[in-house]
Amino acid sequence: MVSVPLLPREIRLHSQSNELELVWSDDIKSRLSGALLRKACHCADCLSTGERNQVEEDALLIRNVVGAGHYGIQIIFSDGHDRGIYPWLYLRELGQV
């Protein structure tokens, strides 16, 4: 039996509440705040320097979301941070916390 990868059917950026909403192929919805996503960044810079632990509150706004192939998405934050790629599985796990 071939397993189907869990992918979002819809991705919505709610600018007013600063949340990213994902509707998954199994109809589960995840709403992730900008603060959670910025602090969960696991790019090389954030992991090696601890940058994600030193984030200012006003830097947590999600400015844009860009596809990163079939792998996941890249999130651009108001502090200019755009180096992290958020894989689908990682986003699903963050939505279950």
Image (cartoon, rainbow, N blue to C red):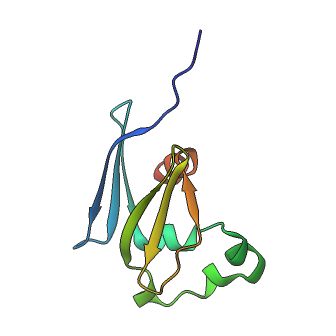
Asked whether 67 or 25 is in front, the reply is: 67
Q: Above or below — where is 48 with respect to 32? A: below
Asked whether 96 or 21 is in front, the reply is: 21
The residue at 52%/74% (across/down) is 82
Give the image location of residue 63, x and y in percent. 35, 75
The quarter of the picture where residue 42 lies is bottom right
The residue at 46%/51% (across/down) is 95
Q: Above or below — where is 40 with respect to 57? A: above
The residue at 52%/30% (across/down) is 5
Give the image location of residue 44, x and y in percent. 72, 71
Give the image location of residue 91, x and y in percent. 51, 52
| Quadrant location, the N terminus | top right
The residue at 77%/77% (across/down) is 48
Asked whether 17 or 63 is in front, the reply is: 63
Give the image location of residue 27, x and y in percent. 33, 33
The quarter of the picture where residue 34 lies is bottom left
